[in-house]
Amino acid sequence: MKLKEIQQQYHQELDLIYGKEEVDSFFFLLIESFYGMTRIKLAIDSEASVENGAKMLEALEQLKDEQPIQYIIGETEFFGLPFKVNPYTLIPRPETEELVEWIIKHQPKLNHETLNILDIGTGSGCIAISLAKNIPTAKVYALDVSLGALSTAKQNAELNNVSIEFIEANILNSETWSDAFKNEKFSIIVSNPPYVREQEKQLMKPNVLNNEPHLALFVKDENPLLFYKAIAQYASTNLEPQGALFFEINEFLGREMIHLLTTNNFVNIQLKQDIFKKDRMIKGEKN
């Protein structure tokens, strides 16, 4: 089956949903992932064909259902590193890369030979693994309540050749915490917890709403800071002196987050915008 013919079919059936440029992007990502065929190779050999085009046609149907291309391929890139993703995990976002970069720039201020870092709600492990890769002296822990997410994160740690200590626990339920976790001290705690309010579902794209895990996305309208409150309380006890707490946050709740950290006795609080000029990250230091 000629790849040019499949490409034409992709445009015929997907252009109205995604637009021509994005459809081309999907097509080239797929042929490279499935057949090792680059865009340049196809440009040179316009008659290139594959024996089995069924994968491409199956992916076409998935794209018509607005399934994320990252789930179809089964992988994505974050902070220059490869990550496996699946419906157990959120697809990492560029703004989360900014959070990782902020932590990396902050860590020299702690002036420790070894840093204990905890990532709460690790999902694919993108934050924990990126930090372990870029701060070689760090001992990194990653916590999640989802066994499916932890399984994926462990694969990603192996894929990127880093050592992470994984913890299965519910940060909202201290009865699931081991004694070691209850008493461990950390230099940095970071979390990108669920923060999209139910009322904001209408603002989300169907490919996110219908495919990515709601467990990792949504909180009730009446208690949008549920996870932040629990994590801030844990951090106020388990951070080392001058240790730092980093969050990715709901862009509409920056003021509420400043108040939350203040009431938990954090100091040097800094609210930071992402590349889209949205209040997206916050940091506080233990008093």
Image (cartoon, rainbow, N blue to C red):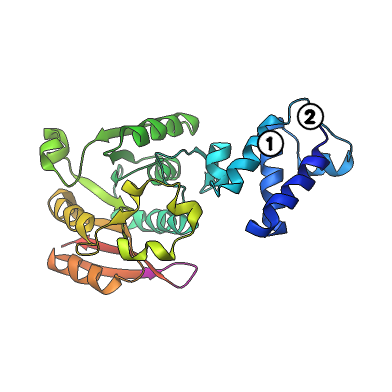
287 sits to left or right of 13? left
**Image mark for residue 50:** 2
Q: Amino acid at mark 1?
A: Met
| Residue in the foreground of this view, choosing between 203 and 70 | 203
Element marked by disc 2: loop
Does 246 sit left or right of 156 as displayed? left
Q: Is residue 26 above or below residue 281?
A: above
Q: Position of residue 267 (x, y in %)?
A: 20, 67
Callouts 1 and 2 close, C-beta under 8 Å: yes
Residue at point 30% right, 71% down? Answer: 254
Residue under label 1, please give it. 56
On screen, residue 270 above or below 185:
below
What is the quadrant of the N terminus in the image? Answer: top right
Residue range (magenta) = 272-277
The reply to whether the magenta stretch includes residue 269 is no
Residue closest to the eye, 43 or 133? 43
Q: CA distance from mark 1 to mark 2?
A: 10 Å
Q: Residue at x 48, y 39 (%)?
A: 85
Residue 279 falls in image quadrant: bottom left
